[in-house]
Image (cartoon, grey):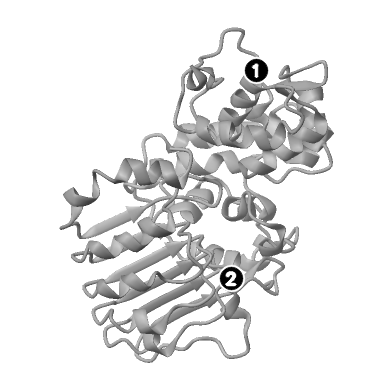
């Protein structure tokens, strides 16, 4: 799946078989082109038995009008959508809606009263929404509303990221929750080369690949300021607490081993300055050292293959220093000024004669995004 059209074709035989579906989760991100097309998003309304929708990266600038037919909805959560407003005429049909969340809805500048006055609505979360920086923020009578905008908190971190940090600070349980291993596997890649997360690394977990305008400035002491202590980094327990919001996971069998591995980074050899400036994780430095790497076509390879033409502007089949930036930007990473190319050239074996090949780009992609190692060459057979 490399495009909305691909997903349309994959879904076509599926739609008739899920007409009684009650829970729909549409995972995605701003980095992926495998997402619902406008027609497919509108077609969700045919699933009239839906009670819960969790959706990401929907294509429309507002709620599809057809969703007015989803009158059994109890919970709607959207993430990384381009919605600028919420259509009151559509929302007014959701008489059973109890929970509404809009996360990373950077363009959202209006929430209609038709939504806020729904009879059962008890929880509204607007995290990373432009509307929360306005003088008159949305109000919910008889329920709880959390509204955190893009402007900076007094502690020097965007308010919407600070909201996540402050919510995580309230978690005290240490149980090995079902999400603990997921949190471990999906967050440690954001750490660069130290034993804990700095304020900038905390922000990177939420904003990797996002436009700089929604990231804002992150103060060096932001975490200490938010916690009211001198602690300005998150250890493993703090990282997991932030990632899953339900536990520190300290009772998990693997916790002590993973904590020791993380803490060992304090004694690791220094990373070259070019890599520090680029924010390159130390695990990426040996990405190309295997003389016989796997060539398997994993699903994540599509991200590399889709981004490659945007980097290889001269069609040479390899990337020069300036093209490396373009390729990485198309992959969803923040890359500029040739720092990534300088790091790859200086600290890895991935570049030859100042150029990066497509197989080597695949190996770097696997290391950076914490995916199974592969050159992705089998994808082109």
The answer to whether mark 2 and mark 1 are in CB contact below 8 A is no
Pointer 1 residue: 288
Q: Decide: is 133 above or below 21.
A: below
Work out how far the residue at label 2 is from the one at label 1, CA to CA, in angstroms.
40 Å
Packing grade of label 1 (10 A; few <14, some 14-19, many >=20) is many
Q: Decide: is 157 above or below 347.
A: below
Residue drawn at (49%, 22%) of the image = 379
Residue drawn at (44%, 81%) of the image = 145
Packing grade of label 2 (10 A; few <14, some 14-19, many >=20) is some
Q: Position of residue 76 (x, y in %)?
A: 34, 68
Q: Position of residue 170 (x, y in %)?
A: 46, 66
Pointer 2 residue: 107
Q: In what element is the residue under mark 2?
A: loop
- Depth check: 93 or 270 in front? 93
Residue drawn at (50%, 86%) of the image = 138
- Depth check: 219 or 174 in front? 219
């Amino acid at each position: 799946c490399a495009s909305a059209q691909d997903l349309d074709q994959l879904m076509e035989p599926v739609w008739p078989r899920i007409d009684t579906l009650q829970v729909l989760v549409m995972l995605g991100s701003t980095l992926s082109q495998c997402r619902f097309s406008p027609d497919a998003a509108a077609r969700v309304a045919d699933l009239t038995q839906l009670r819960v929708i969790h959706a990401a990266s929907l294509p429309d600038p507002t709620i599809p009008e057809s969703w007015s037919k989803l009158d059994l909805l109890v919970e709607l959560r959207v993430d990384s959508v381009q919605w600028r407003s919420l259509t009151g005429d559509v929302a007014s049909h959701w008489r059973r809606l109890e929970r509404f969340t809009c996360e990373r809805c950077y363009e959202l500048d209006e929430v209609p009263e038709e939504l806020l006055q729904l009879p059962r609505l008890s929880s509204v979360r607007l995290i990373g929404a432009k509307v929360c920086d306005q003088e008159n923020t949305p109000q919910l009578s008889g329920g709880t509303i959390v509204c955190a905008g893009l402007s900076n908190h007094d502690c020097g971190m965007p308010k919407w990221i600070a909201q996540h940090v402050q919510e995580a600070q309230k978690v005290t349980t240490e149980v090995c929750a079902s999400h603990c291993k997921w949190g471990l596997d999906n967050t440690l890649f954001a750490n660069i080369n130290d034993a804990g997360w700095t304020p900038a690394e905390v922000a990177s977990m939420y904003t990797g690949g996002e436009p700089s305008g929604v990231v804002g400035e992150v103060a060096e002491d932001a975490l200490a300021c938010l916690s009211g202590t001198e602690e300005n980094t998150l250890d493993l327990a703090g990282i997991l607490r932030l990632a899953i919001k339900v536990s520190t996971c300290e009772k998990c069998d693997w916790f002590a081993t993973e904590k020791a591995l993380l803490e060992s980074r304090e004694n690791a050899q220094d990373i070259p300055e070019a890599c520090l400036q680029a924010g390159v994780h130390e695990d990426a430095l040996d990405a190309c050292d295997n003389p016989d790497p796997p060539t398997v076509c994993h699903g994540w390879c599509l991200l590399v293959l889709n981004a490659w033409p945007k980097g290889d502007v001269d069609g040479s089949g390899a990337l020069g220093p300036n093209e490396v930036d373009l390729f990485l930007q198309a992959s969803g990473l923040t890359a500029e000024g040739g720092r990534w190319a300088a790091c790859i050239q200086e600290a890895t074996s991935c570049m030859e004669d100042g150029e990066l090949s497509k197989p080597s780009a695949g190996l770097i992609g696997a290391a950076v995004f914490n995916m199974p190692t592969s050159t992705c060459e089998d994808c082109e057979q």
